Amino acid sequence: MAASSDGVMLSQDECRRLFGAVQQAAASLGASDVEALFGAHCAALTRFANNTIHQNVAEQDRWLSVRVIVDRRTARATTNRLDADSIRGAVEQALALARSSTPNSDLLPLPEPSLISLTKRFDEITAAATPAHRGQAVAEAIRIVESAGQTAAGIYSTGQSIEAIFNSRGVSAWHAETMAQFSITAMAGDSSGWAKASAVSHSAIDPAALARSASEKARLSNNPQEIAAGRYTVILEPAAVLDLVGQMFGDFSATSVNDSRSFLTDRLGTKLFGDNIDISDDVAHPLQAGVPFDGEGVPRRKLMLVDGGVPRELAYSRSSARRAGVEPTGHGFPLPNEVGEAPLNIVIAGGSTSVDEMISSTERGVLVTRLWYIREVEPYDKIMTGMTRDGTFFIEDGRVTRGLRNFRFNQGIIELLCHVEALSPAVRASGEETFDMVVPAMKVANFNFTEVTRF
């Protein structure tokens, strides 16, 4: 792993050494059950607008979060200073908070260690990327957009991070990762286009291709026309699928189901979606990113969330698993928390139909680049409202004929996933409303546009 110039990143050996200091401080204060979470990141970003790079920023941080258990009480304290006095201070604060809290009869002891399958998510070249590297790529993207008479804005970021967890029962887990992200909006007089991508390695991102895509969308949606709101066959590009369908995965939590806060309450094992809908949570998927263990150090296992349209599995923390009499799945958040758990590595299985093939098979429909300002209207049927933006097009007789004014929609996710007519191959997609996922484009019948917006 590449380290920053001042050593802000933490190696596995450094985390182990610091945990020794945590244990020593805890023992001297009368606490034997202790857990430590470590985190560190170095991130840099090049921002551009009005066809000019106007900002290069970088940030770095590292932190330690200590949790203690005393007499069925638990509490956590966090510090970003890792000297001996600060570590002892964090332990003292956690103990003081724990001792002042109410005992919890359901509190579990710290977990024992389990085998964690390591995932390689670190790219040395991405970790070492410089402002000059990002600036060169951004300059080429700007040139592409500017040559079309448009204005470019966006960001290019690169960075590295580590997460680790150690506890006094022997849990010892550490993960390093890099991430690159490029986002661009091309703006014309009365239209815009957008594209975005992220990857563990910057070599998997092509800023020039993203710029050409955004610019072409802005050109094709020039002088947008208005058509009546109503139900249409809609082709949702992967970013639009991500931001809409991605709103439902917090409901695949055993705690949420148990509390009757999930649309899956009393529905697990019932067919809710179309036969062609298969969804998993898979931290090991080659297009995914993230830590292979949860907030207590339990290894994440693959979940089959939806199989042939039927919701099958939920995410379980240790606590919710004990209540249900099942094994934890490794999806719990650090304790204490009120959320419980959630799947974080969503993979929606794709098909073999390209977006171009979806368009050519559509007599009359709408092509949607992305969605935004999405809010929940009705939780049980997962009806969401939001708007299209940055590239909405009318399809007539199998081809895109013109840009459209943006729509507001009211659409149930359950209903949508019952009317998927075609799926593209799945890709890693980035949006604005939720975390990145691996998803396909979808051709969907009877998508409900409720009104035309005025921008």
Image (cartoon, rainbow, N blue to C red):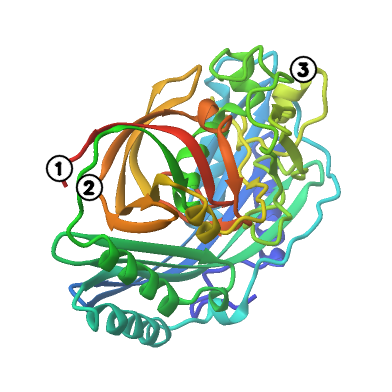
Residue 445 in the image, given as x and y percentages of width and height? 49, 35
Q: Is residue 379 left or right of residue 342?
A: left
SS assignment at label 1: loop
Residue lying farthest to the front in this orientation: 397
Q: Amino acid at mark 3?
A: Ala
Q: Are marks 3 and 1 in contact (CB under 8 Å)?
A: no
Specify which label sits upstream in the sequence, 2 or 3. 3
- Quote the CA–CA distance across marks 2 and 3: 49 Å
Which percent across, then down, holds residue 281? 69, 43
User: Mark 1 highlights which residue?
Assistant: 454
Amino acid type shown at disc 2: Arg
Compared to residue 87, the image places residue 265 above or below, namely above
Query: Which one is nearer the viewer's eye here, 234 or 441?
Result: 234
Residue 135 lies, with reference to residue 72, above or below; the image says below
Residue beneath disc 3: 324
Amino acid carrying mark 1 in the image: Arg
Which mark is first along the chain, 1 or 3?
3
Residue 147 point in image, percent of width and height:
24, 84
Residue 56, can we see it?
Answer: yes
Q: Crowdedness of circle 3 by 10 Å Cα count: few (<14), some, many (20+)?
A: some
Name the image quarter holding the N terminus: bottom right
